[in-house]
Amino acid sequence: MTPDSRRRRLVLLALCLAGFAIQLDVTIVNVGLPTIQRALRASPGALEWIISGYALGLAALIPLMGALGDRFGHRLVLLAGLAVFGTCSAGAALAPGPAALVGARVGQGVGGAAILALTLAVLTDTHPPDRRGRAIGWWAAIGGTGFGAGPIAGGLLLSSFGWSSIFWINLPIVVVTAVLILLAVPRAAATSEPRPLDVPGVALASAGLASVTFGLITATDRDPARILIPLVVGGLALAAFVRWQRRASDPLVPRAVRGSAAFTGACAIYFTSYLAFSGTLYYVSLLFQNVLGWSALRTGLSWLLLNVPFLIAAQAAGELGQRFTPRATVTAGCAAGALGVAALSTLTPTTPFLVAAVGYLVAGVGFGLLVPGITHVAMRDVPGSVAGAASAVLNSARQLGTAAELAIVGAAGAAATQHTWSASQFGQERWPSGIATGDLRGVPDHVQAAARTAFEVGYHVALGVCAASLLVAAWLSLRVFEQSRVG
């Protein structure tokens, strides 16, 4: 093995660990919420913001971090992001109360924004085009497994240690990642002629993404003003951002990136596929834990049937990219994902687990093919000087898709549940508070069956929306990649 090959492997390991930590932190905290609630006497609203604060910090600052990386160096800003993420993880572990924990979670999101924005940029800097596809496959495989590993790691940690352990676990990952980056990633990150920072563009993009994400996070709120006002404000800010990008002499999103049909198509597919991915895991978890009574650890262990084929398919995607066009790989992945989610949509409390296992396996293969395929198409022709901006835009699309899950998939499921309940013989009685999520604790015995049926209908509709979203992604792959002559 040559020194260059050894260095590239160390870089790839560091980037995979960084992506793993960010995804792990999304789901590992969910497992610890009941324990945190008891230990810190947190209100339901505070628990919601322990999750949402992280997403908000991520979404709002991804564009800024990408721009800073292109100006001051991908390596430097990535290391700064790791430092902030690790420091705020320690702050979360030591938080004396809910408010401090929410603040630390927002700080984790700020550090995570730099990591999300620049891991792909550093990968582009350090891997030549002929090796990039395989590297992206590994990055997607290892990073993606963090999402499914969260409930398993969280369940194991909480069974032996306190709630703070789910935040302390980030520190060794951050330290190892930072050391590898210092050793293996070249220092020459900033270009000799760094791009000017598009301050109005950064401000408009950050404000728009933050407002839209806030509106999507509060989509289940009963006060329409709390949902519509931030969505409208965010939409106007993003519209102003698009208008400004057309006029700016040095726009935040470079014209070379903005004018690529393959890149914009990849962003659209990322949005629709992650909406489906997040929505599927959310509703399957509700079914297993709230309706079937599974523990978070058992639910997380069942995700191994999704994670293992995801890992294998994502790693193989780099090899398949040498034999098949990206259009074929991404389309096949979207179609397989839709088929697997459709199988999961048929689950009921009496369905044999074999059906869920098949759905997991097929969906895992599909997502394992489409994620690295999309990423490779988006980043393969991006110049290194604007890789930070391109990576930031691509990951913003993914983050918005994840945030939109509650607004679109959750709203569809809740509407179907409420309609079914209203049409039942108990429809005139008060709407049980937990029925939309399948949490039937406290629901009177005489309406338990009707409430469970209503949730099941909502579950089927929600996963139907997820499957349809993946079919839309497959259609986009066929249309956009064909027009842009990809493959």
Image (cartoon, rainbow, N blue to C red):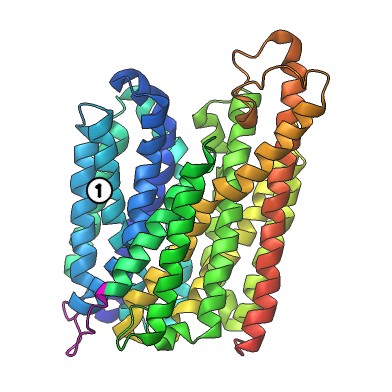
Residue 99 versus residue 34: which sits nearer the camera?
Answer: 99
Residue on which disc 1 sits: 107
Q: Looking at the image, can residue 284 be seen?
A: yes
Please name the residue shown 42% across and 88% down the image. 256
Q: Looking at the image, can residue 142 be seen?
A: no
Q: Is residue 30 above or below residue 36?
A: below
Is 187 contained in the magenta span? yes
- Which quarter of the picture shows residue 285? top right
Residue 159 versus residue 283: which sits nearer the camera?
Answer: 283
Q: Is residue 279 above or below residue 204?
A: above
| The C terminus: image quadrant | bottom right
Amino acid type, residue under disc 1 in the picture: Gly
Task: Locate residue 159, reporting x and y percent.
Answer: 38, 23
Residue 442 versus residue 119: which sits nearer the camera?
Answer: 442
Left/right placement of residue 264 relative to residue 415 reads left
Residue 235 versus residue 365: which sits nearer the camera?
Answer: 235
Please name the residue shown 41% across and 45% down the image. 26
Left/right placement of residue 243 relative to residue 302 reads left
Task: Locate residue 201, reporting x and y percent.
Answer: 32, 74
Q: Is residue 201 above or below residue 429?
A: below
Q: Is residue 478 above or below residue 332?
A: below
Please name the residue shown 37% across and 26% down the image. 158
Please name the residue shown 23% across and 72% down the image. 68
- Which quarter of the picture shows residue 382? bottom left
In magenta, the rendered stretch is 186-199
